[in-house]
Image (spheres, rainbow, N blue to C red):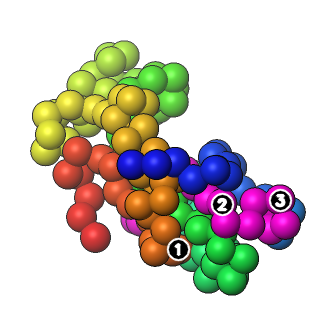
């Protein structure tokens, strides 16, 4: 697998970000980070779900718009990934659902068909693939990397 000469990892989204890269990154890649939460609503985190759904929609729109410049725009939708984000989420559930700290993380990790929460390293293979020349014909797609938790 050969990485494309011009790759960009975009972890957020902003109006016109693709156009700003159009000349500099012609033939390159934009990889957005969405979330499986963007594919469905969830209690207590509606705004987060809505922003991640917007990332998925932006990926589709920008992908269709920018492919004419040979810029491939795709996204990764992680499932539950252990780390600071889930430490914070766990604290919120401990507070609002009166649970012991750590319990929600443990319960959520057990629901993943793979048997555990993901790690940042679990996402790197998809990111490297989407940035490579092997993904040249993939446009405006969002890939679940979630241990089998969400199928689409």
Residue placed most toward the observer, 125 or 60: 125
Q: Is residue 65 visible?
A: yes
Asked if the residue at tag 1 contacts the one at tag 3, i.e. Cβ–Cβ closer than 8 Å, the answer is no
Above or below residue 127? Residue 133 is below
Q: Secondary structure at mark 1?
A: loop
Q: Residue at x 53, y 74 (%)?
A: 140
Task: Please state the horizontal and vertical placement of residue 120, each as a whole percent of the image.
Answer: 42, 30
Q: First in sequence, mark 3 or 1: give its number.
A: 3
Q: Residue at x 45, y 23 (%)?
A: 83
Q: State the residue position of label 1.
A: 140
Q: Is residue 42 visible?
A: no
44 displayed left or right of 30: left
Above or below residue 12? Residue 86 is above
Count of numbered tags: 3
Task: Please state the horizontal and vertical placement of residue 88, each as a whole percent of the image.
Answer: 51, 26
Quarter of image, res 114:
top left
Kindly report the distance in space between the C-alpha atoms of the residues bearing marks 2 and 1.
14 Å
Magenta region, residue range: 21-40
Q: State the residue position of label 2.
A: 28
Q: Secondary structure at mark 3?
A: loop
């Amino acid at each position: 697998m050969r990485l494309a000469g011009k790759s960009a990892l975009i972890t957020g989204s902003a109006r016109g970000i693709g156009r700003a890269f159009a000349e500099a990154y012609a033939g390159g890649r934009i990889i957005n980070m969405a979330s499986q939460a963007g594919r469905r609503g969830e209690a207590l985190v509606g705004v987060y779900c809505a922003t991640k759904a917007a990332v998925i929609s932006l990926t589709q729109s920008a992908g269709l718009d920018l492919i004419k410049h040979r810029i491939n725009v795709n996204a990764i939708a992680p499932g539950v990934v252990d780390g600071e984000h889930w430490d914070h989420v766990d604290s919120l559930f401990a507070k609002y659902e009166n649970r012991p700290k750590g319990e929600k993380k443990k319960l959520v990790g057990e629901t993943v068909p793979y048997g555990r929460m993901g790690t940042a390293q679990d996402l790197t293979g998809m990111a490297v693939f989407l940035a490579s020349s092997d993904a040249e014909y993939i446009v405006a797609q969002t890939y679940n990397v979630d241990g089998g938790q969400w199928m689409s």
